Amino acid sequence: MKTYKIALIKGDGIGPEIIEEAVKVLDAVASCFDFDFEYEEALMGGCAYDITGDPLPKETINISLNSDAVLFGAIGGSKWDSLPREKRPESGLLKFRKELGVYANLRPAVVYDELINASSLKPEIIMGVDIMVIRELIGGIYFGEPKGRTEDKGWNTMVYTRMEIERIAHQAFKIAQKRDKRVCSIDKANVLDVSQLWRDVVTEISKQYPDVELSHMYVDNAAMQLILNPRQFDVMLTGNIFGDILSDEASMLCGSIGLLPSASVGEKIGVYEPIHGSAPDIAGQGIANPIATIASASMMLKHALSENAAAKKIDNAIKRTLKEGYRTKDLAQYDAKEVCSTSEMGSIIANYAAK
Ligand code: NAD
């Protein structure tokens, strides 16, 4: 029997509620296989600041680096908004990603047939959408130097090195090989020198993956094409700022923010987390949708632990639960047979995942 060590970072707001349901489902699915989990909790965000005075205690990094993967809830809330920037929960999260070297953010945007009416786009446009946005996470304009501001001027610098582009491109091509074998690389090579380098390096790396078809698209056109004809995309490869914007746009094709998982991976340990925040407005009410976190746990099984069959079981359990009409409050108006609490939703999915 193999035991996987999982660092659990519940965080703030709805974080503890949704992580509890993901753990329920992970344990249920493990009962069908020859592995189990050993969880170790670690603090991050506002709750960590309240207890230790630091939104990212060193111990959290150590626990994470000593694990096979990190399952993360969400952090933040207005209670901590007036703290100095370096003490705020969000600073802890950015530092955490940098410390762990998670340079690739994987965000699948999959439209569930059962929730086809939950999207703001027409069903015939979004039916069958299955996109993986792969965003560079620890470089580009959010980190480039020089940056600064005076009273009358503000500036940031968009920098990518060959090495940074190569490693994210490899991730994209490898992931595409397991999907529909198409990568669309997004840039602004008609205007930006950094994007010209991006395009050249991605094209070079693509030669190592002859089975994957590469295309290039300018970011402004990509924003339009995502709304016009999202089914044309398989893997979208982007730099940090373009991916930040396009992955949010792609996620909204799917209905509720409570559905969408993500993985942040790199050379060391991967972090698996829902794309949403800590939702302080609904925390403690038992109405948060746990599906994004449960689907993140499925990504963890697949990408960090290579337990593909177990991941598939979770994905199928989520689909079955939605198909049978179980909905949390955020999706209650879309063909709900029964509206359930966070915990009931977790239990139904766990039950199906264990079959
Ligand atoms: P949010 O994602 O927390 O919430 C936006 C809206 O979506 C809210 O109405 C919320 O109730 C709803 N929502 C979010 N998750 C849901 C779920 N699982 N089920 C049902 N409804 C859900 O974004 P926000 O309100 O802008 O931010 C709240 C806090 O979260 C802020 O402090 C922000 O900095 C933080 N945040 C953290 C992360 C993270 O931890 N990775 C990401 C984004 C925002």
Image (tube, rainbow, N blue to C red):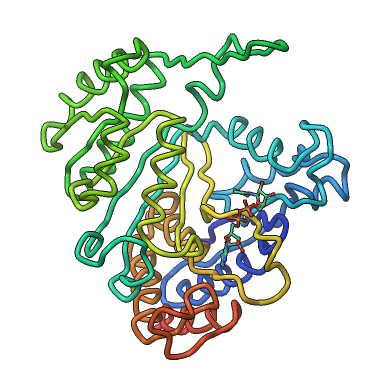
Snapshot quadrant of residue 156 = top right
Pick the front one: 160 or 333? 333
Q: x%, y% of residue 350?
A: 49, 79
Q: Is residue 1 visible?
A: no
**Residue 234: % across, % down:** 23, 47
Q: Quadrant of residue 19?
A: bottom right
Q: Answer with left or right where residue 124 lies relative to residue 95.
A: left
Image quadrant holding the C terminus, namely bottom left
| 25 in relation to 257, above or below | below
Q: Residue at x 88, y 50 (%)?
A: 51
Q: Residue at x 36, y 87 (%)?
A: 324
Locate residue 243: give its quadrant: top left
- State whether residue 218 appears in this view: yes
The residue sitting at 11% across, 37% down in the picture is: 211
Q: Quadrant of ligand 1?
A: bottom right
Residue drawn at x 24%, y 43% is 225
**Percent position (x, y) of residue 308?**
34, 60
